Image (cartoon, coloured by chain):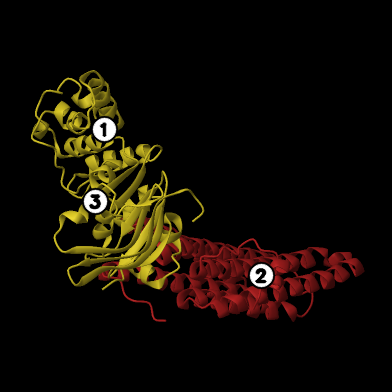
Chain colours: A yellow, B red
Amino acid sequence: MDVNMIISLQNVNFYYGQSRALNDISMDFSEKKVTALIGPSGCGKSTLLRLLNRMNDLIIGTRVEGKVVFEGKDIYADHIDPVEIRRKIGMVFQKPNPFPKTIYNNISYGPKLNGLGNSDLDTLVEQSLKQAVLWDEVKDLLNKSAMTLSGGQQQRLCIARALAMKPDVLLMDEPTSALDPISTAKIEELIEELKKDYTIIIVTHNMQQAARISDETAFFYLGNLVEYNKTDKIFTNPDVKQTEDYITGRFG
Amino acid sequence: MEEKRHTSSHYEIELQEIKNGLIYIGALTEKAIQNAMKSLSERNSEMAHKVITDDDEIDKLDAEMEEHCIRLLALRQPTAIDLRFITTAIKVTGHLERIGDMAVNIAEKVIQLNEEPKLKPYIDLPRMADLVVEMVNNSLDSFIRNDLNVAEKVRQTEQITDDLNEQIFRELLTFMMENTKCIHRALLIMHVSKNLERIADHAKGIADMVTYMVTGENVRHQTRDDSAKEPA
């Protein structure tokens, strides 16, 4: 596809021990677009997502072949610091996981560890919470525990926390599957706003969500990339029969 | 390749109901055209009146079909082939309803014609009517069976009906020029021919939608030159 590319996968294979979970994946993620990864359970989409910021390194026995190129460098090269990668490629998980700290400290914790001074933290916390469309709801509660927030608010807090590190890319692994429909709609609305400034890659089991919010969609099956195209095309006239069978519910 | 069934059997049934419903509406419209033409050849105004009143049934079924399709769009959020199938079905039912209206128009002209002596033997009109009924039948068949070849045959037949309409028009023009007392009857017969030609247009419209449904390609407003340039 003919847009700016931010992350490029080149002939990537991924293994859990001896078992290959991703087969020769080559794909480019477009900058400042929302890309949805869809496919049945076990197809490798979450594995691929975690590959993009080396979260799979935390699982013993995993191995990567091929290249994952970000900012012109293979992020799996020996000299690359995975922590720095994870700052630039942030992640939001399925279950909201705020720190057991105040709302303020949830946001400020990461930047503080990276040496940001106290005078700048207040501004950063406010900015991040505003970006996550949470500021108005919590501005008078910053010293309250994050655990007192609702599920939807906690998830937006996690997004704000990731944004506070000023990433280039946000990875979201089923970010709304644990939320009610209204909270889901708010997160989707937030994603629509965030893509003006950030590249977003989202794993979702909800195909209507993928159709609603993504610009591009990649369909995976059994570790293979089956089809990758503009979302409009995938959901109106996919090129591959297998993709059509999946999205129309004729799978299995 | 045989289409796999949906995981949801209810959804499968709902989609099948669209096909069954359109087959039934199609059968009613074909009967309406045939009866309208029969009322012309037999000079049977009672039959013509029945064509007019029976159109209410077609209108009712069209509204129900549209409602059913909209409901599926809302509740099932169809994608890809299913989305194209349902949106095509909405168009098809619209075409069939208009075909029913054309049959009514013909019946109305027949009632007026039957009040005057017959102008001439009808040769081209019944021929045109047979072609048009076949087009409607084939267009629906192509929709039900996802058959691009049959759809293309319908699209090509449309030219023949256009030519027949032209021929009928020229012949009737001659009649009118030779004898002004014929003008009213000739004009009524021209209307019948024109309505048959419009039915053929609607059948082609259905065939165009079938092409879109099967391939995703919109061919609806192509000119005949565009079609001629297309590879086989």
**Mark 3 or mark 1, which is nearer the start of the sequence?**
1
Judging depth in this view, the residue of B97 and A111 nearest the camera is A111
Cβ–Cβ under 8 Å for marks 2 and 3: no
In the image, B124: left or right of A43?
Answer: right
SS at mark 3 in the image? strand
Camera-side residue of A84 and A39: A84
The residue that label 3 is drawn on is: A173
Q: Residues within 10 Å of mark 2 (few under 14, many from 20)?
A: many
- Looking at the picture, which amino acid does disc 2 mark? Leu
Q: Picture quarter containing residue A197? A: top left
Residue A91 visible, this angle: yes
* Dots 1 and 2 on the same chain: no
Q: Which is more foreground, mark 2 or mark 3?
A: 3
The N terminus of chain B lies in which quarter of the figure?
bottom left
Identity of the amino acid at label 3? Asp
Q: Amino acid at mark 1?
A: Ala
The CA distance from mark 1 to mark 2 is 69 Å
According to the picture, the residue beneath numbered tag 1 turns out to be: A164
- Subunit ID for the residue under disc 2: B
Name which quarter of the figure residue B98 lies in: bottom right
Q: Secondary structure at mark 1?
A: loop
Foreground: disc 1 or disc 3: 1
